Image (cartoon, helix red, strand yellow):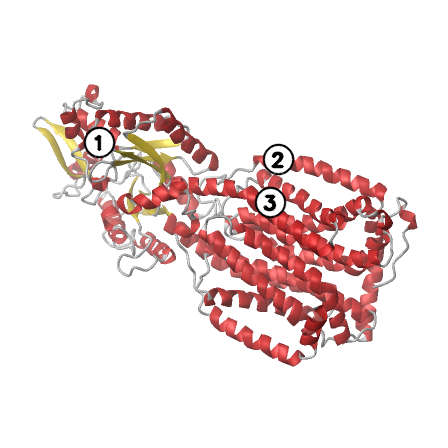
Amino acid sequence: MTGRLENLLFRRRRIVLAAFALLTLAMGWQAAGLRVDAGFTKLVPVEHEYMKTFLQYRDEFGGADRVLIAVMARDGDMFTPGFLAALRKATDATFFLPGVDRSQVYSILTPNVRFIEVVEDGIVAGNVLPADFAPTEAGFVRLRENIVKAGLVGRLVANDFSGAIVAAKLQEFHPGTGERLDYIEVAHQLERIRGEAGAGAEVDVHVDLHIIGFAKAVGDVADGAVRVIMFFGIAFLVTALLVYAYTRSVRLTVPPLACSLIAVVWQLGGLAAFGFGVDPMSILVPFLVFAIGVSHGVQMVSSVRAEAAGGAGGIDAARASFRALLLPGAVALASDSVGFVTISLIEVQVIKEIAITASLGVAAIILTNLALLPVLLSYFEADDAERRRARERDDLLRPLWSRVARLAHRRPAAAVIAVAALLLVAGAYFAPEVRVGDEHRGVPELRADSVYNRDSALITDRFEIGVDVLTVISETVKEGCIDYEVMRILDDFEWHMRNVDGVQSVRGLAGVARVLNASWNEGSLKWRTLPRNRYMLVQSVSPVPTASGLLNLDCSVMPVSVYTADHKAETIARVVDAVKEFERANRNTRISFRLASGNVGVMAATNEEVEAAQFPILAYVYAAVILLCLVSFRSLAATLCIVVPLGVVSLLAYALMALLEIGLKVSTLPVVALGVGIGVDYGIYIYGRLRVYLEQGLDFAQAYERTLATTGAGVTLTGLTLAAGVATWIVAPLKFQADMGTVLTFMFLVNMVGAVVLLPALGAWFVGSGRRASSDPAVSPRPPAA
């Protein structure tokens, strides 16, 4: 089969090149139509129990797509004509945002925000901003009183009266067009509101706007992702310099870079052809595909260069390299594919799209690096100067490889294995400290000092609510809101949740009914309780409209909103456990509590999905890698030598995440799996060459020294090019990109060290007796030049 493929490629080189050129043009044309495709449900596990609750009641009570705009007076006083003018501008602009549910827009200026007051004649209700409001001192005193009566302090008005909030809920699909809402456009509209709300002749006070919400976060992530293109250019330049430093030849540097870029074009074109877009969360995959392409291309270039240095002509060198690298290259790329395919087991749409995107890229690399690249390199004819430079480089590196090869003897190998065991213990100690979910406040995809996270911190500090809310759906019998036993349990639940650490406030129908009952009794605090009499209970809940989101039409569903101080993993886990604990302790056929809606409910579902998937994914990756190694090398010892370093590095990667406080979430869970799938490449290439020398009758130490002399520099450059492709992410504007870059850079480099150092140490002890090295380093002969 290898011979047939070889003849097919090299006997018709021009036809092969023409076919690749035409296909690249077609894929480039397809890629030109690629679009950014962001969506809320793409980021969540829609099959999770919590998400089924979320989707069931999303239309009735709203989802997690909330937007909060805090208009804050710089002088700390919101009761001025200029501030109200700015708030009016922000409210009106929010009302006309694309995709906004206009019945769910709230501010102290909207007619759906009302107060209830107890007077001598009974109860009086009205708009918080009276219809006859005048911006006078008396008018502002009346407005302030209405705000207090409505209980808006801490909710729609800052605790210190320094600002007010405009709150709105978005629909995932535009109600006018029926198309998926463009969150990036909504984010840009929100930025226009920020710039325009404080401008105009009628605004005589300086105000600042602080905006948070899912749409705004997606827009900021997308804007940061666009800037990543600059980092792609930097990574390309660094990679090109590394390859040139290795080859000392422009003719050998350009082909692997060109083939890797072609693979990226094919990947993007394939996405467009299959009807997919690019999600901001998957914007980094083309970078990774480019790095993988260059790293595998370096192996082909290294082999061709070694053959040419030995006197072979261009086409002979390319043919020999194709024969030598087809199997290990195919196995290595198959292992890369396994890493990508297994992450699709996570039931989150964006993860599945990442898996599809990356798999298309790896499929393209198989064609460009194992077919196109050797054909291009067949036109390379080394001259005497290039052969001389190659030999000089080999002579320069030979002492280094001789020292490293000593690790293939049993005595130094035992020391290496002991160090690896210590690292394994250290990794096992810190790895369990990795938390599932976010480790910090604010949006974890953005830097802590980003505008969004600063806005989020201010709103959390000045108000009792924020964008972090867990909505628990209490399901009961029809007209359950006038059943005392049902309302008592609901009231106990609200009290229970208020006492959970990390909860800022709780809003539910039982609490509102208690206040209204007191209102019907001259506002006496003695009556701030739930009346046992059914008719008094009707009187207490009837003023509450369904638009409040506290009940549905027949009172069979009563959501309870639990506002949390943040959405850190430990906070979410504590609040969710408290809900489950109460449900277990108060099982009742007339009322039950279902998790969950709100953005914290979505995060809770995502965290549980990630926690359930992390170990199966790693198990599948390792099982596939082990199977590939067993099939390829037909040796349990070889498989052990390749896989054990991977396991050590995986554990160390978890330890690194724990030390750097990088949580396991949708954006970081795939990293460890990808690090294993790609990191195994080093071991496959090394053992693929090592096996050739072992079959020639050399003992293990001699075979390994010969292997380093021929492939050591190539494997080292593979690690450096992979690391260079992702290391630039560390300083990217997006935090999740920086986290992925940090972990992948660590895994790529340490996997390379493990393959060069730990693999031969294990081989010295576990490879068959006829191929083991002597325990004396001095008996290893010096290998000839490549």
Mark 2, residue position: 430
Quadrant of the frame with the C terminus:
bottom right
**Can you tell which of label 1 and label 2 is closer to the viewer?**
1
- Residue placed farthest to the top in the image? 526
Measure the C-alpha gap from mark 2 to mark 3.
Answer: 20 Å
Neighbourhood count class around disc 1 (C-alpha, 10 Å): few under 14, some 14–19, many 20 upward: many
Asked whether 34 or 119 is in front, the reply is 34
Measure the C-alpha gap from mark 1 to mark 2.
Answer: 50 Å
Q: Viewed as shown, does residue 290 lie left or right of 307? A: left
Measure the C-alpha gap from mark 3 to mark 1.
Answer: 49 Å
Rendered location of residue 156, percent (x, y): 28, 39
Q: Viewed as shown, does residue 661 lie left or right of 182? A: right
- The amino acid type of the residue labelled 1 equals Cys
Q: Residue 409, labelled with which disc?
A: none
Neighbourhood count class around disc 3 (C-alpha, 10 Å): few under 14, some 14–19, many 20 upward: few
Q: N-terminal of the two: label 2 or label 3?
A: 2
